[in-house]
Image: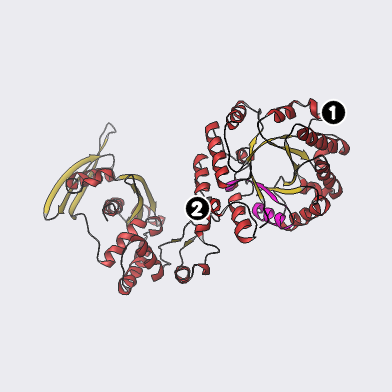
Amino acid sequence: MEQVKLYDTTLRDGMGGRGMSLSVGEKLKVAQALDALGMQFVEAGFPSSNPKEAELFERLAEVELENATFVAFGMTRRRDRAAAEDEALAVLASSFAAAICLVGKSSPLHVEKVIRVSREENLEMIADSIAFCREQGKRAIFDAEHFFDGYREDSAYALECVAAAAGAGAENVTLCDTNGGSLPSYVAEATAAVVAAVGQTVEIGIHTHDDSGCGVANSLVAVEAGARLVQGCVNGYGERCGNANLASILPALQLKMGFDAVTPEQLASLTPTAHYLDEICNLASDPDRPYVGRNAFAHKAGMHAAGVAADASTFEHLDPAAVGNQRDIVASELAGKATVRSQAEHAGVELDDEAATRAVQRLKEREHRGYHYEAAPASFELLLRREAGTYKPLFRLESFRVVVEKHADGEVTTEATIKVEVDGRRYFQAAEGNGPVNALDKALRTAIAGRYPHLADVELTNYKVRILDEAHGTGAVTRVLLDSADGEREWGTTGVSENIIEASWEALVDSLEYAFQ
C-alpha cells in the first residue's frame, strides 16, 4: 500500500488551544505517546521562543524515538537579511532536531500587508531559508501559510511560492488552510493544481484547521488529490476550533482509503492513546469523538442493538477493536430484548426469554419514572439479577430516620438511625455525618460491617442530583446518581423519588450491593 505520513503538531500548534498548557515533563510524555502510536513526525516547536521550550529541546535531545522524527519549527528569514545572518534560523540549525519546518507566506495579501515586502523578496526569503537549512544538513519542510487564501487571490503567485521552496530543496511543501475557512471541493481543486505543477519534484502535504467544521474532510480530499503528508493533532487540539483531528484522519486513511500510515497494532492503540493524551492535557475526553469516543460504538435504539447482535456491520462502519475501542449496548427506554440480553451476557447473568421480556418491561417502566440506567449500569445489572432470580440483598431494611438540626449559632448537625436485619439478626445503629446521605452511609456500614468487611474498600466518589420536573418546585421528582469504586472497579448507581433522601438511599444501597454481586 502507498504510504501517507502523519505529522503531529500538538506540542506546537496544539498548545494554541484555549486552556492548553503543559509542563516540560508532560510534553515529553506526549512526544513518547505519539511516537508509540506511529507518527512519522512530531513537531516540537521553536527551540528558544521561551525558557520552557529551551528546556524541552534540551531534554528531547536525550529521548530515543522508534518511529518519529522530531521537527523544529520556525519562520523564513527576516526581510533585508541573509539567511546565514538570521539569528532565528541559526537557532533552528543548531538544534538537535533532524528536520526543520519553516512557515512562509503564500498569500499576496499577507506579503504586502503583514511582512510588507515585495512579492519577489518573499520568494527569495522562502528559497534562501530552505536552502540554508539544507546546507546545515537538515531535512526541510515548508509550510505555505494561508495557501488556500493565496490561491484564491492569485493562483499563479501561490504556486510560485510553492515552487520556490521545492526548487531550494524542501522535501515536502505543505499547503495550509490557516484560518480553516476553506471547503472540501476547493481544497481538492487547489491541491490537485499543486500536485500537477510540482508534484513530480516534491512531496505535497496538507495542514487544515476546523473553523468551518471541515478539517478532517479537507485533509482527506487533499490526500485523494495527491497529498502524501497530513499535519494535525491527535484529538484535534489547537487554536480557535482546533487543528485537523488525526485520531479521525488516521483510521480513515488506513481502513477506508487503503493507505499505509501505521502498523495494525499501532492503530489498535489509537483509542487508549487519545484518552491518555486528554488525561495529560487535563481535558475531559469527548465521548462523541469519531472512532475513539466512548459513544463511538454505543447502540441505544432497540432496532440497532438487535441488528448489531445479528451482524455488527449492520450499524457499525468498522470493527471497534481495529481502533482500540469497544462496542457498548446502552440500556434505556429505547431498548429491546437484544439490548437486555447483551447486557446480561456481559454481566454474567443468565436470562431466559420470559425473564428478558420482564426485564425489558421493567426497564421501560422505570425509565419512564425517571431512572437513567445509561448512566447507572450497576443499578441496571441489579435489575437484571432480580428478574433472573439471582439477586441477593445484603440486608432487609426495617426502617431508617434522619434528623437535621440547625442551631442558632449556625452549626448544623445530622444524625441517622437505621434498623436492618442480616441473616435473621436485627441491627440498630446511629451515626452522625456531613449531611443526611453521609450519615445514612455511616450508620449502614457500621451496622453490617462485621458481616461484610469488604465494605471498607467501597468509596463513594461522586454524588449528583437532578430535578426531573422543575414545574413542581421543591416537590419535584429527584434523580440521584452515585459513582463508587473499590480500588479495582468503578460503577454507577441511581435512585429516583420525590424525596431526595429516599432517592439517595436507593442509589446508596445499590452501590453497596453491587460490590458483592
The reply to whether residue 299 is in sight is yes
- What x and y, as percent, mark residue 396? 18, 56
Residue 437 shown left or right of residue 245 in the figure: left
Residue at 36%, 59% in the rendered image: 371
| In front: label 2 or label 1 | 1
Question: Residue 287 bears which disc, if any?
Answer: 2
Answer whether residue 472 is magenta in the image: no
- What x and y, as percent, mark residue 259? 65, 57
**Name of the residue lying farthest toward the left:** 425
The reply to whether residue 481 is in sight is no
State the quadrant of the C terminus: bottom left
Res 386 quadrant in image:
bottom left
- What x and y, as percent, mark residue 401? 20, 48
Magenta part of the chain: 213-235
- Identify the element where label 1 is drawn: loop
Q: Is residue 424 above or below residue 126?
A: below
Q: Is residue 265 above or below residue 366?
A: above
Residue 360 shown left or right of residue 21 in the figure: left
Residue sitting nearer the eye, 244 or 350: 350
Residue 371 shown left or right of residue 180 in the figure: left
* Mark sitting earlier along the chain (2/1): 1
- Identify the element where label 2 is drawn: loop
Residue at 56%, 35% in the rendered image: 27
- What x and y, as percent, mark residue 334? 43, 67
**Name of the residue lying farthest toward the bottom:** 354
Q: Which residue is mark 1?
A: 80
Residue at 78%, 47% in the rendered image: 202
Q: Amino acid at mark 2?
A: Pro
Q: Is residue 83 above or below residue 505?
A: above
Residue sitting nearer the eye, 450 or 333: 450
Answer whether residue 226 is magenta in the image: yes
The reply to whether discs 2 and 1 touch (Cβ–Cβ < 8 Å) is no
